[in-house]
Image (cartoon, coloured by chain):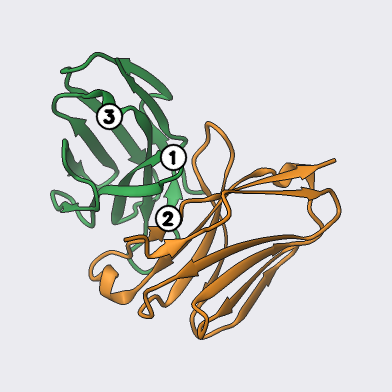
Amino acid sequence: DQQVKQNSPSLSVQEGRISILNCDYTNSMFDYFLWYKKYPAEGPTFLISISSIKDKNEDGRFTVFLNKSAKHLSLHIVPSQPGDSAVYFCAASAIEYGGATNKLIFGTGTLLAVQP
Amino acid sequence: DVKVTQSSRYLVKRTGEKVFLECVQDMDHENMFWYRQDPGLGLRLIYFSYDVKMKEKGDIPEGYSVSREKKERFSLILESASTNQTSMYLCASSLTATYEQYFGPGTRLTVT
């Protein structure tokens, strides 16, 4: 049962345009969401996050939007650069999963290719 | 900066061998995690630990065990490696008070 879903395995965008990566979740108890970026042969690196009490968080070229009623979040990258080409994972967490530890539930990832 | 290191980047083992993957973090994080990454399946949690000598099963613990004797070190053990354990293994750590996990570079394990 995939609680965090990234339905697009891949996305191709022209340099300078907007990249929009989508993520859907099923568990209404999720209260914190994160995006990670992963290059081949490297570990994922944290990119940006958002709490469920917000609907938008911005950090430079990266903005995450959260629509709680639709159980949907998206990552916008503007403008896209060739160096942004990587696999992007969304992840979610909930207090009920945390307990003594904040576990993350990851999506399956979207491969973004930014064409020069 | 948080640094998470893993003992090997690439490893080739034979079926039935016992395999040890080690992970060390240098930021005094309480929590440590082992994931495997497979195409189309994302990151799946194998085991995690929230304190020394404490461990809990993740979503896919079968065929694996872990050890955490010191706060900075978390080991993943494949008792008898099988070909379906060929994968990228990722270690991560975090503070209890935060959600962000910091990952190591990964170990690409091939079992032949």
Whichever of labels 3 and 1 marks the residue nearer the N terminus, that label is 3
Question: In the visual, does A40 lie left or right of B70?
Answer: right
Q: Toward the viewer: B94 or B21?
A: B21
Chain B is shown in which shade?
A: green
Q: Which mark is residue B71?
A: none
Q: Are marks 3 and 1 in contact (CB under 8 Å)?
A: no
Q: Which mark is residue B101?
A: 2
Q: Chain of mark 2?
A: B
Q: Toward the viewer: B104 or A50?
A: A50
Q: Toward the viewer: A115 or B79?
A: A115
The residue under label 3 is which amino acid type? Answer: Asn
Residue A56 at x, y percent in the picture: 63, 78
Q: Are marks 1 and 2 in contact (CB under 8 Å)?
A: no
Q: Toward the viewer: A63 or B112?
A: B112
As drawn, the chain in orange is A
Q: Quadrant of residue A65?
A: bottom right
Image height of A54 relative to B40, above or below? below
Viewport quadrant of the C terminus of chain B: top left
Residue B105 at x, y percent in the picture: 47, 35
